[in-house]
Amino acid sequence: MKYSKIPVAQSIVALCVAKNINHVVISPGSRNAPLTIGFTHHPEIKAYSIVDERCAAFFALGMAQQLQQPVALVCTSGSALLNYYPAVAEAFYSDIPLVVISADRPIERIDIGDGQTIRQKNVFENHILYSANLYSEIVLENTSADKKLQQKQFESQKHNQREINLALNKALEGKGPVHINVPFYEPLYEIVEKASVNPLQILPEIRERIYSEKELEPYAEIWNKAKRKIVIVGVAQPNALEQKFLDFLAQDESVLVLSETTSNLNHPEIFTRIDTLIGPIERSEDAAEQFEALRPDILLSFGGMIVSKKIKSFLRNFQPEHHWHVDPKKAYNTFFCLNKHFETSINSFFGKFHPLLENGKSDYALHWKNIRKKRQARHDLYVQEIPYSDFKAMQQIVPSVPEKYNVQLGNSATVRYAQLFNWDSTLKLFCNRGTSGIDGSVSTAAGAALNNEDPTLLICGDLSFFYDSNGLWNNYIPKNFRVIILNNEGGGIFRILPGNKNTENFDTYFETVHNMNAKPLCELYDFEYFSAKNSEEISESLNGFYDTSEKPKLLEIFTPRQINDEVLLEYFGFMKS
């Protein structure tokens, strides 16, 4: 086996392997050569080469999202590292473990005019769980070296090994991004056949707070007395809540379980489309009265970010007396009324809480389930009448997706349209909702596709796709990867916001109107290309789109730019009737 001659590079590789961090995405460079040599020659490492660092970082994020374990990123010094930042921020807010390992110049070379040199120390300090800033290690050629030099080498190695351990452990324990910045002296490309270090491994401490029934009894008493309770679930891995607990909550007459497309929970009694419940109330003349009837006594939340702005507005204006959040790591005060954080996993919490609970007697759930039935009937009528648009296209796309697909959603309009439809219960749905940016949608989906037994479908808008089209520039995209683009020739989401539409200023600086299409990119990256400009062509294109093929496929659906906002906004007015 081959190793970099530089001890710190050997330590990083050895400790990653020891902690089962064996997927590494590498972007080419010279300063990171010692790391590249070490990772690519290790038999337990699966290494991937992606040139564009921003794409590489989101690709790794997609992998980590599916693997539920850390994925490492390796880059050279300078601006290469800064291109990781959007994915690092997304990983920070989405609790996805990434290990960023950046090569650097020795400290005395910083700010003296050396090329590819920036201030890399603590560069991600606002969005990182741990920053390990390592010492440069001098390779001693013989044992007769000066004793002070030997002592300095020994101390540097021990410091570095401790910092590497702490950083990797934090990624494992805290489920988030960490940064290891390692400065290298030249020469960078020397290889040895035997490792010169055997770094000490500090084991991670993955702990979970376990609440006793005695601790939970006061909260159970509050719960059992309450007649109106909402359980709201944000972004979550599939089946994050055990079925027996979900069954109990869904059948309780005093409980409404509100989930989102990205919550990945399925039960016939839960509310999966929050906006179809809240949006029509906003348009009603007696909105305050209806919201007061919906206001819960207790709000229990778990999972990550909430997509729906409508539910945020409702719960901020009609606050519950109690808001409890269950999460082992953090609790956001999203609704401005958080008064209890249970620092444990949701299943551990309900394992102790559930035996203390009674089925509530209330007409709360029944009342809103009846309204849901009426909403569904109005929804079915509306989609039959609407003109060809983004909304109409999504109505055709959603039922077309085969069972057991991994569906990756773009941000802005796409994920919001997705919230309005019922999806097959076998699908797994994901979206980068940590920062909710359009950057990285393609790369994340490509990374997710690589480490998933089920096929992957990306649905995104045109700006999301073109912004991250370099995400297709890699050699790892499987043949069963599918992409559907809703191309409305700009940022259509801005048309539903307040402002002066159909002006030159709006078209150029907000909606960013363009006439691009994806066909040349499909030719460049060897995708099968399909396009549609009306409902009939969508149906024709979707027929066989998911079938086995020798190449990945992309369907670009062109929709009229200026009516999408009207169709969406009128939907909620129609639903209230």
Image (cartoon, rainbow, N blue to C red):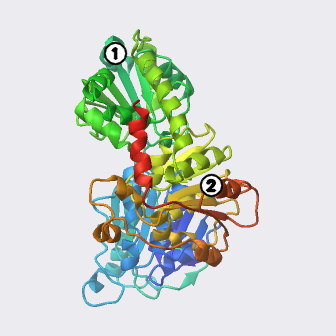
Q: Position of residue 33 (x, y in %)?
A: 50, 81
Which quarter of the figure is the C terminus placed in? top left
Mark 1, secondary structure of its residue: helix
Say if 133 sits above or below 384 in the image.
below
Residue visible at 51% across and 58% down?
460
Q: Is residue 51 left or right of residue 162?
A: right
Q: Is residue 159 left or right of residue 1?
A: left
**Would you name the residue on which mark 1 appears?**
217
The quarter holding residue 99 reads bottom left
Residue 354 seen in render: yes
Residue visible at 44% across and 55% down?
563
Q: Which residue is more in the foreground, 485 or 430?
A: 485
**Would you name the residue on which mark 2 appears?**
456
Q: Position of residue 499 (x, y in %)?
A: 26, 57
Judge depth for marks 1 and 2 and give the one in front: 2
Residue visible at 67% across and 50% down?
454
Evaluate if marks 1 and 2 touch, with contact meaning CB atoms under 8 Å apart: no
Residue visible at 29% across and 34% down?
314
Q: Position of residue 570 (x, y in %)?
A: 40, 43
Residue 327 seen in render: no
Disc 1 to disc 2, C-alpha distance: 44 Å
Q: Residues within 10 Å of mark 2 (few under 14, many from 20)?
A: many
Q: Is residue 529 left or right of residue 152?
A: right
Say if 253 sits above or below 137 in the image.
above
Q: Please state which amino acid type lies under the numbered disc 2.
A: Thr
Mark 2, secondary structure of its residue: strand
